Amino acid sequence: MIRIEGLSKSFGKVEAIRNVSFSAADQRITALLGPNGAGKSTTLRILSTVITADSGTASVGGCDIASEPMAVRGEIGVLPHATGLYERLTARENIRYYGELHGLKGTSLRDRVEQLIQDLEIEAFADRRVKGFSQGQRIKVALARALVHDPGHLILDEPTNGLDVMATRALRELILKLRDEGRCILFSSHVMQEVANLCEDVVVIGGGQVRFQGTLDELIASTGHNNLEDAFVTSLGDSAHE
């Protein structure tokens, strides 16, 4: 489980998030929704231990992000909005390198890399350099990299961005499979159809603050709208115009 309590973070005079609190449960997919500049990326970067919060606490799988950052990195797999792959390395080398960073080696590392290459259908381009890959190929390799150490928690930041219909469908099926294996998945997206198809729970952030947390059905019921997009906009309140 991912737990966040009272997180705040400012960059100079800009207050990115204010007293953000929410949780994401195991074996469920939680959507993190909000307009651009709402504080989603800041929250995810804090959870990923890339930056530190000014105040508040958070834990991943019971590990505190401030006092146990290395343990958190072992618990979490991150698919960032920009895949950040090393373009001069092959797909296989990218995955293997991150496995080594997580302490895998020898036969166990080789077997894990091969398993992910098969599971994510990377075989056809596994030994090609990443430079020149399509967006769909990059997403597959970045996801394999995030999964190489078999984490119990996943942060997916707009994973379907730039994918075609078939790649989106394949990724959706994989995410559901990962959920069914018991993982806690925090899913950031601007595509309401993807949220409706994948997520059970939703957290809405606007103006750096949590505006709603609950199930998708509860969000729709609380706003009186019949569709997710209208419910999302209504839940933002005045922050939708900030």
Image (tube, helix red, strand yellow):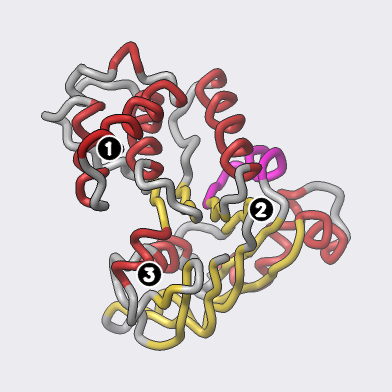
Closest to the observer: 201 or 158? 201
At label 1, the amino acid type is Leu
Q: Position of residue 13 (x, y in %)?
A: 31, 84
Q: Which residue is mark 1?
A: 109
Q: Is residue 167 above or below residue 214?
A: above
Q: Which residue is mark 2?
A: 28
Res. 106 image quadrant: top left
How crowded pointer 3 is (Cα within 10 Å; few <14, some 14-19, many 20+) is rated as: some
Most extreme residue toward the left, as rendered? 88
Q: Residue at x 40, y 25 (%)?
A: 136
Which span of residues is magenta-colored? 188-198
Q: Is residue 13 above or below residue 162?
A: below
Give the distance between the C-alpha atoms of the residues marked 2 and 1, in whole angstroms: 28 Å
Closest to the observer: 99 or 164? 99
Q: Nearer the viewer, mark 2 or mark 3?
A: 2
**Is there a contact, CB below 8 Å, between mark 2 and mark 1?**
no
Label 2's element? Answer: strand
Q: Is residue 136 above or below residue 17?
A: above
Most extreme residue toward the bottom, as rendered? 55
At label 3, the amino acid type is Ile
Q: Position of residue 177 (x, y in %)?
A: 61, 36
Q: Position of residue 159 (x, y in %)?
A: 47, 40
**Is there a contact, CB below 8 Å, between mark 2 and mark 3?**
no
How crowded pointer 1 is (Cα within 10 Å; few <14, some 14-19, many 20+) is rated as: many
Give the distance between the C-alpha atoms of the residues marked 2 and 3, in whole angstroms: 21 Å
Q: Earlier in the sequence, mark 3 or mark 1?
A: 3
Give the distance between the C-alpha atoms of the residues marked 3 and 1, in whole angstroms: 28 Å
